Amino acid sequence: MKSFAKFTLALSLVLALVAAVSGVWLWQEMWSHPGVSISINGEDLYLGEMASGHWAELLVGGLITGVVLLFVLPLVLLLGVGLPLLIVGGVLVCVVGTVLAALFSVGAVLGSPLILLGLVLWLLLRDRRPKRNAQA
């Protein structure tokens, strides 16, 4: 693996570790203050009063968010940005190829008498003797 790829991989792993540690520290800090609450639709939920159902809902919400960020978002970006760019690139290549083929075709039709004359001259003036290999 190249050194830039190693550096990028190491940096991303370090940043992921820092994010995880920061999340744990933030969670511990929220638990240490009993007055901290989460407000959803104007209803305050205190962390100490949350039942197991609330924690399950929080876990399911986090899992759904993770799946969306890991799978859905890259697919949307790939199909929404990458695919149109590939289509536009393919159309441009086809258009440029068609224009070049038309130009070469017109050039071949207009220059065909000269091309045929050049071919005849080359066939007449070329050296027909087989080349001998140098023997040492």
Image (cartoon, grey):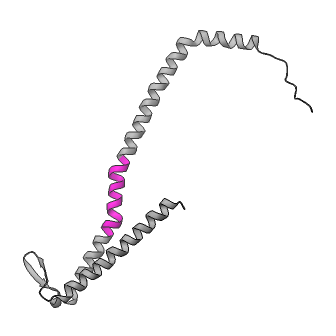
Image quarter of the N terminus: bottom right
Look at the picture and state if 98 lies above or below 39.
above
Q: Residue at position x 40%, y 44% from top?
A: 86
Q: Residue at position x 31%, y 66% from top?
A: 69
Q: Residue at position x 27%, y 78% from top?
A: 60
Q: Quadrant of residue 65?
A: bottom left
Look at the picture and state if 128 lies above or below 43.
above
Q: Position of residue 7 (x, y in %)?
A: 46, 64
Q: Nearer the viewer, residue 79 or 22?
A: 22
Q: Position of residue 114 (x, y in %)?
A: 60, 10
Give yes or no for residue 135 being in the magenta stretch. Answer: no
Q: Position of residue 134 (x, y in %)?
A: 88, 29
Q: Which residues are magenta?
A: 67-83
Image quarter of the C terminus: top right
Q: Is most of the magenta stretch helix, strand or loop?
A: helix
Q: Nearer the viewer, residue 97 or 24?
A: 24
* In this rendering, position of residue 101 left or right of residue 67: right
* In this rendering, position of residue 60 left or right of residue 100: left
Q: Nearer the viewer, residue 20 or 114?
A: 20
